[in-house]
Image (cartoon, rainbow, N blue to C red):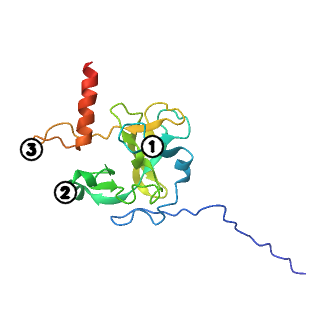
Amino acid sequence: MMKKREKLVLIRAGPVYNFDKSTSSCISTSPLLPDPYESERVYVDASLISNAGEGLFTKIAAEAGTVLSFYNGIRITHQEVDSRDWSLNGNTISLDDETVIDVPEPYSHVTKYCASLGHKANHSFTPNAVYDSFVHPRFGLIKCVRTIQAVEKDEELTVAYGYDHSSTGQNVPEAPEWYLAELRAFQASLKK
């Protein structure tokens, strides 16, 4: 008598994630597939910072040193970034000496791209987080948002963008005008 073989049935319980390293022309093959780790920890809402647009907020309280968000984007060169107008570099971050991660239009809107949300963290001269390197299982080497102090649930995450405050050969600092205005206001507040 032959024994009946049991069948293994796979039931898909949720979305399938694959290695999805960005290129210079493709931010993600699944730009609207949120990162599950990030989805449990952060959300995007109107920033509490004046004129900043959207910001990145915590869903949970977290200790210092906690990775809460990821910063993926298309991969372009520093030369490309340096040759463009500042207005096109609003969501760029240096990955290494050769590569810059960029979240260009239309992907800066969560309705077009929400696979990572780290580009939504706004600047502060007194930040509660930093951008740090991270090897992500889906995106490969990218940046992450890591807390530098304890944060409370629903707190806005901020990072210091690290623009160059000094003047260049043209006697103009390497930073966008909004940043220079914020820098002047911050420096004035320290003198009070």
Figure check: 158 above or below 91: above
Kindly check if marks 3 and 2 are in contact, taking CB atoms under 8 A apart as contact. Answer: no
Residue 24 visible? The answer is yes
Question: Which quadrant holds the N terminus?
Answer: bottom right
Q: Identify the mark nearer the N-term, 1 or 3.
A: 1
Q: Dot 3: what SS?
A: loop
Figure check: 42 above or below 108: above
Disc 1 crowd, CA 10 A, few/some/many (<14, 14-19, 20+): some
What's the amino acid at mark 1?
Ala
The residue beneath circle 3 is: 170
Disc 2 crowd, CA 10 A, few/some/many (<14, 14-19, 20+): few
Q: Is residue 59 left or right of residue 141?
A: right
The residue beneath circle 1 is: 46
Q: Who's the residue at 47% across and 58% down the image?
A: 111
Q: Identify the mark nearer the N-term, 3 or 2.
A: 2
Q: In this view, does 109 lie to the left or right of 11?
A: left
The residue beneath circle 2 is: 83
Q: Which of 178 and 163 is in front in this view?
A: 178
Q: How many labels does the image show?
A: 3
Locate residue 114, reporting x and y percent: 47, 55
Locate residue 53, reporting x and y percent: 39, 45
Locate residue 62, reporting x and y percent: 53, 35
Q: In this view, does 135 lie to the left or right of 75?
A: right
Closer to us: mark 1 or mark 3?
A: 1
